[in-house]
Image (tube, rainbow, N blue to C red):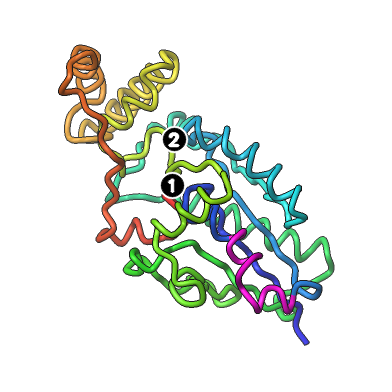
Amino acid sequence: MKQKIIVIADGQGVQSKCLPIALYEKHPDLREYWDNTIILDLFADTQDEEDDIYKDIVFYQRYLQEHNYPPLIILSRGSLSQEYYEQGIIPTRQFRHCTDKFKIRVIRKYIRSYLEENNLTLKDVDIRMLIGITIDESIRIRDSEVQWIKNEFPFCYELKFTRKDCEKFLDDRNIPYHKSGCDHCVFKNAKKVYKSVAHKPKRKQFIINWEKKARAKNSKMLFFTAPIEKLFSKFDRQKKLPEFIELDIEIDIQSEECDTGYCFL
């Protein structure tokens, strides 16, 4: 019999924070095979997440420990923004390779290392990747690109959760949560990126310098439709005005590049 391995693709957003706990409490198959199943709750950290995500992780790790749940394992390739800055590249909606390099590959590399360390081969295991896409976002469901991992979506089938259900589930347990994603992500709107870094002058200037360096190689390389320095200057002038309202993150769920299931969950 093959060794069953459940990998939770944990982005530390609303859905993926809810997923492991909801499964531990509600999913009968997981309880049935608990003693014989290896559970890896993996968070691939880009080191560029919103500040609230890192604060939430501390509480989340403590909650898992107090309830004797498998721990959150934090992985990282390094700083996404620093690597792309050095290369003079900005991830764009059209060429969004950041998720592949800093999320998907990092998780797959860890799984292979885990197998090697435990004297297991791909022939010895049945690996299920659990992804926190909810039924209201089911358009994002995709099969795994590799044969040795099978993607599963418990919120869409076994649990029947929407994003609102996830929020209520976490609220009922007093678990803090925020939408995940890098502070500079181009799938946000420019004002949201500004709000993420406006209180951090060094980070704000880094993003401006990053775009300038990228534009020195390619003048069309922009985070948004206008240079980010101009946008930030505009927001600096507007931020005290009543009409400078909070805008939510914009996610283009129709875009295939955003269908990975590793970001914004």
Left or right, residue 41 beside residue 14: right
Q: Residue at x 65, y 79 (%)?
A: 29
Dominant secondary structure, magenta? helix
Indicate the position of residue 75 as horizontal and vertical percent values: 64, 46
Residue 191: quarter of image: top left
Q: Is residue 30 magenta?
A: yes
**Which residue is situated farthest in the front direction here?**
172
Foreground residue among 259 and 11: 11
Residue at image mark 2? 84
- Which numbered disc, 2 or 1, marks the residue closer to the eye? 1
- Under mark 2, the amino acid is Tyr
Q: Residue at x 35, y 69 (%)?
A: 138
Left or right, residue 149 beside residue 40: left
Asked if marks 2 and 1 touch (Cβ < 8 Å), the reply is: yes
Foreground residue among 6 and 29: 29
| Residue at disc 1, secondary structure | helix
Foreground residue among 260 and 55: 55
Q: Residue at x 38, y 27 (%)?
A: 196
Crowdedness near tag 2: few (<14), some (14–19) or many (≥20) residues, C-alpha within 10 Å:
some
Q: Is residue 209 magenta?
A: no
Left or right, residue 27 beside residue 62: left
The range drawn in magenta is 20-33
Label whose residue precedes the other's in the sequence (2 or 1):
2
Label at residue 259: none
Residue at image mark 1? 98
Where, quadrant-wise, is the N terminus in this rendering?
A: bottom right
Q: How far apart in space, not on screen, are marks 2 and 1 (Cα)?
A: 9 Å
